[in-house]
Amino acid sequence: MQIANTAIPYPFTFLQAVLINIGIIYLVLLAMIGLTLMLSAKMKSPYFVLIIFVPVLFIPMFLTPNGTTGAYNLTLFLLPYRASMPELGKYISYQFGGLVLDALTMRAVLYGVLAVILPPLASLGFKKHQAA
């Protein structure tokens, strides 16, 4: 990858970078599907699901990261729109005590956990859901 840009800190080949990014995109999609299912199980109208889901997906398209590191940038790079972009040339890290995760690992962990947790919550909601 360093042949494409010398500022890329990851020691990946092009194939590895593509496969990692595709894996993260699938995790993002699975988490968003789980979120959609959970919201539709909890809410009475599908319009309320759209009212919540559309801003989560489309507002980040119009937000740009600023030059400083802070909660705004760290949150922006974890939202679904930015998480589907490789962002290999950016130095983004998330620190939790002594543990420091790069952006790709943090995205994989966050959306992997969401993809595992949200569908069972949705199934619990659908079990209690009564058809009108």
Image (cartoon, helix red, strand yellow):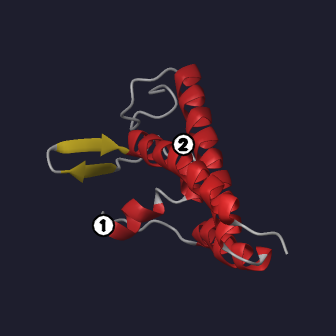
Q: What residue lies at 56% left-to-right and 56% top-to-bottom?
A: 121
Q: Mark 2 Cα within 10 Å, few/some/many (few <14, many 20+)?
A: some
Count up the numbered dots.
Answer: 2
Which residue does the image show at 41% across and 33% down from the upper left?
6
Q: Which mark is residue 70?
A: 1
Residue 129 occupies which quadrant of the picture?
bottom right
What numbered label is drawn on residue 86?
2
Residue 58 in sight in this render: no
From the top left corner, tell me how far across and down residue 28 is, in percent: 59, 47
Task: Say which residue appears at 39% left-offset and 30% top-offset.
Answer: 10
Question: In the figure, residue 58 lies in which quadrant?
Answer: bottom right
Identify which residue is drawn at 49% across, 25% down: 3
Q: In this rendering, is residue 78 above or below 104?
A: below
| Element type at mark 1 | loop
Q: Alpha-carbon distance for marks 1 and 2?
A: 20 Å
**Looking at numbered disc 1 in the image, what kind of residue is underneath it?**
Gly
